[in-house]
Amino acid sequence: MSPTNKQPLTAQICEACLPDAPLVTEQEQIELLAELTDWSIIVEENVKQLSKQYMFGNFVEAQAFSNQVGEIAEQAGHHPAILTEWGKVTVRWWSHKIAGLHKNDFVMAAKTDLIRK
């Protein structure tokens, strides 16, 4: 269960993130990352991001997955970086307004995993 909410991440709602919203703390990052499978924290252009690579049997499957991720992103109003390649999709979540990781990113990462199950 999430350290700041008793519900699992997949049941939580992505909330609007304001420019002054707090970044998750190092401790929160550790606890929230523990709720995810195979996600890692990377740094791109000095911004922490959640990243995961999904493997597929062909481009059509990869593209379909990318479209589904795009749909949940649009519904939530929170948009990742999605790189679609033959047999592989890389998804990166971070909060652009605060240039780093917010709890929303962990919620959306968990929801991304639900698509692949």
Image (spheres, helix red, strand yellow):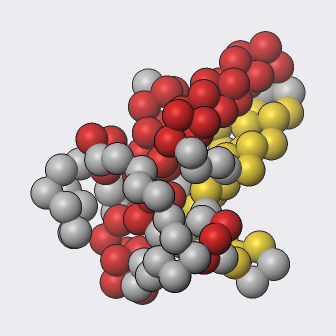
Residue at the (61%, 63%) spot, across then down: 94
Quadrant for the C terminus in the image: top left
Is residue 5 among what the camera can see?
yes
Identify the residue at horizontal 81%, vertical 35% (top origin).
Answer: 84
Q: Nearer the viewer, residue 48 or 40?
A: 48
- Residue at 48 percent across and 48 percent down: it is 108
Vertical comparison of 103 with 54: above or below: below
Q: Position of residue 30 (x, y in %)?
A: 38, 75
Q: Is residue 110 left or right of residue 65?
A: left
Q: Single out the residue that lies furthest toward the left.
A: 6
Residue in the image at 60% along x and 36% along y: 74
Residue 97 position, x and y percent, is 64, 71
Q: Position of residue 116 (x, y in %)?
A: 51, 27
Q: Residue furthest right?
A: 86
Q: Nearer the viewer, residue 31 or 17?
A: 17
As drawn, is 89 to the left or to the right of 110?
Answer: right
Please state if 12 lies on the left or on the right of 6 as rendered: right
Q: Can residue 52 be seen by looking at this rendering? A: no
Q: What is the tally of numbered marks visible in this picture?
A: 0
Q: In the displayed structure, does residue 77 sit left or right of residue 7? A: right
Looking at the rendering, which quadrant does residue 66 occupy? top right
The image shows residue 44, relative to residue 63, as above or below, that is below
Picture coordinates of residue 55, whole percent (x, y): 67, 32
- Image height check: is 63 above or below 48? above
Quadrant of the snapshot with the N terminus? bottom left
Classify residue 63 by image quadrant. Answer: top right
Image-quadrant location for residue 111: top left
